[in-house]
Image: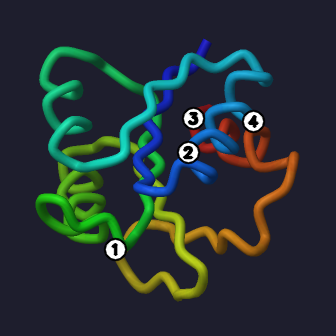
Amino acid sequence: MATIVVVDPGKIWLDFLCGLFGDNGCGVMPFTNLADAKVALETNLVDLIICEATVLEPGDGILWARELLARGQRAVLLAYSGSHRGNDPKILSKAAINANLPAQLLELLT
């Protein structure tokens, strides 16, 4: 079973994503801010981190995802729009998220 951290300041998105992954057999650790997520990652190993790109408290979701990738941690950003370049994290459009998302992201783990 994959363990996934989801960081999104919006309760609706957080609940939606946690439900999608939980329904697909994943362990989910939800957070509404970077500070709490970072503390949890000090003592927990996870398979994937999904972070809203605009999370700013404290720090920046995009910069944090870059740091995670540099350390070898799998991380994906969520945004309403955006593009991915070079070593930047993969950015998923919130407008395109559907029930296939867990399967698509879990493929990253194999």
Q: CA distance from mark 1 to mark 4?
A: 27 Å
The answer to whether the residue labelled 2 contacts the one labelled 3, judged by CB atoms less than 8 Å apart, is: no
The N terminus lies in quadrant: top right
Q: CA distance from mark 3 to mark 1?
A: 18 Å
Q: CA distance from mark 2 to mark 1?
A: 26 Å
Q: Position of residue 55 (x, y in %)?
A: 32, 64
Residue at image mark 4:
20
Q: Which of the two labelled residues, at mark 3 and mark 4, occupies the earlier sequence position?
A: 4
Q: Which of the two labelled residues, at mark 3 and mark 1, occupies the earlier sequence position?
A: 1
Query: Which is closer to the viewer, label 4 or label 2?
Result: 2
- Residue 109 has which mark? 3
Which quadrant holds residue 89? bottom left
Looking at the image, which is closer to me, 61 or 48?
61
- Residue 60 has which mark? none
Which residue reaches farthest front? Answer: 11
Q: Secondary structure at mark 4?
A: helix
Tag 4: residue type? Leu
> Which residue is painted at 28% across and 49% down in the image?
33
Q: Position of residue 109 (x, y in %)?
A: 57, 34
Tag 3: residue type? Leu
Looking at the image, which is closer to me, 107 or 82?
82
Q: Position of residue 100 (x, y in %)?
A: 86, 48
Residue at image mark 2:
14
Number of numbered discs overlaid on the protein picture: 4
Query: Which is closer to the viewer, label 1 or label 4?
Result: 4
The C terminus lies in quadrant: top right
Residue 61 position (above or below residue 42): below
Q: Secondary structure at mark 2?
A: helix
Q: Which of the two labelled residues, at mark 1 and mark 4, occupies the earlier sequence position?
A: 4
Tag 2: residue type? Leu
